[in-house]
Amino acid sequence: MKSRLFLLVVVIAGCTAAPPPPAPEPAAPKVARALVPAAASEPAPAPPPPAAPQKAEVPSNVPASPPPVSSTPKAPPATKAAAPAKAEAPAAVATRPAAAPPLDLRSLEQRLKDTGAIGVLTKLSLKNQVDDLVGRFKAFHGGQRPPTLGDLRPAFELMLMKVLSLLQDKDAALARDINASREAIWGVLADHDKFAKYTS
Amino acid sequence: MKTLAAVLAASAATLALAAADPKQKQDLTSVIALNGKPCGEVVSYVVQGDNDFLATCKDKNRYRVYVKDGRVVVDKK
């Protein structure tokens, strides 16, 4: 029962609140990762500075140096070849957004259970539908096709929309938090290991 | 006999009160919508038993909403 409710929160929290649309977000780290090795091996090309929105790893050949305010005026005595990458690294660190707080599914679950914005029958009906959806994810992770992830994502989004529409007027804070956790919840549902961990 | 009459009267009063509960109406409205049934809004309902309601919608549709084996069932009447 607890795990079902927990999954309900997971599914519900599903999906969206992240300010940018879902597609760009996963793509960003890939771009960042792709750019970093490229910069390490080929110092010549100048990658666009704002390309590393999240974690910009400093290339291994760049020594750790104090972040200069401006990289151009006086070259530090370290290796010159890595100068462009070096100049980029501190900027990336400076512009890195604060790490998102860890997804607290337990808290979301409890808040969903406690909220007065949804009636008892509605909560039970919602739980039934979440259980059904989780069952489809179980089938997916068990190797059954269909459903594919492409089939499950719209169902997940629809479930989130239902939850959010039930909450948004009477418990806006919870709706906002669930919406903000959308991608994280999808990440749990779509990943075999995370899903197994949460359903066990 | 008097006690029985008093209990019945109290029960009837409770049911009548419950049938006018706006929160229950909203709950029934949400459940019916969640199950994809046309309704609009529940304007009245009758309590038929424990977790068993007969809801009348604004668009004149009527649904029995009840719990069976842990699942909420919405049947058109």
Image (spheres, rainbow, N blue to C red):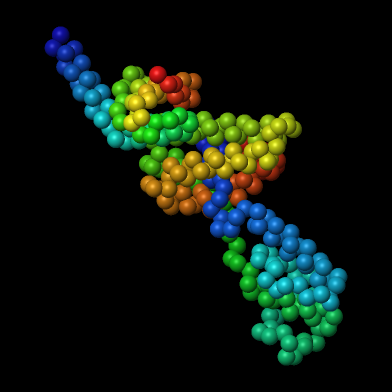
> Is any atom of residue A132 visible in this view?
yes
> Is any atom of residue A63 visible in this view?
no
Q: Quadrant of residue A32?
A: bottom right
Give whichever of A180, B4 is nearer the camera.
Answer: A180
Residue drawn at x 39%, y 31% is B39
Residue drawn at x 66%, y 64% is A54
- A69 shown above or below B62: below
Specify whether A111 is left or right of A64.
Answer: left
Q: Quadrant of residue B23?
A: top left
Q: Position of residue A185 (x, y in %)?
A: 59, 46
Specify the quadrant that holds the C terminus of chain A: top right
Give whichever of A91, B1 is nearer the camera.
Answer: A91
Q: Residue furthest bottom?
A: A73
Q: Position of residue A105 (x, y in %)?
A: 54, 46
Q: Position of residue B51 (x, y in %)?
A: 38, 23
Q: Residue furthest top?
A: B1
Residue drawn at x 45%, y 44% is A165
Q: Position of residue A126 (x, y in %)?
A: 49, 34
- B5 shown above or below A128: above
Q: Quadrant of residue B64?
A: top left
Residue drawn at x 27%, y 27% is B19
- A98 shown above or below B15: below
Q: Residue furthest front?
A: B59
Specify whether B76 is left or right of A11.
Answer: left
Q: How many marks?
A: 0
- A70 shown above or below A13: below
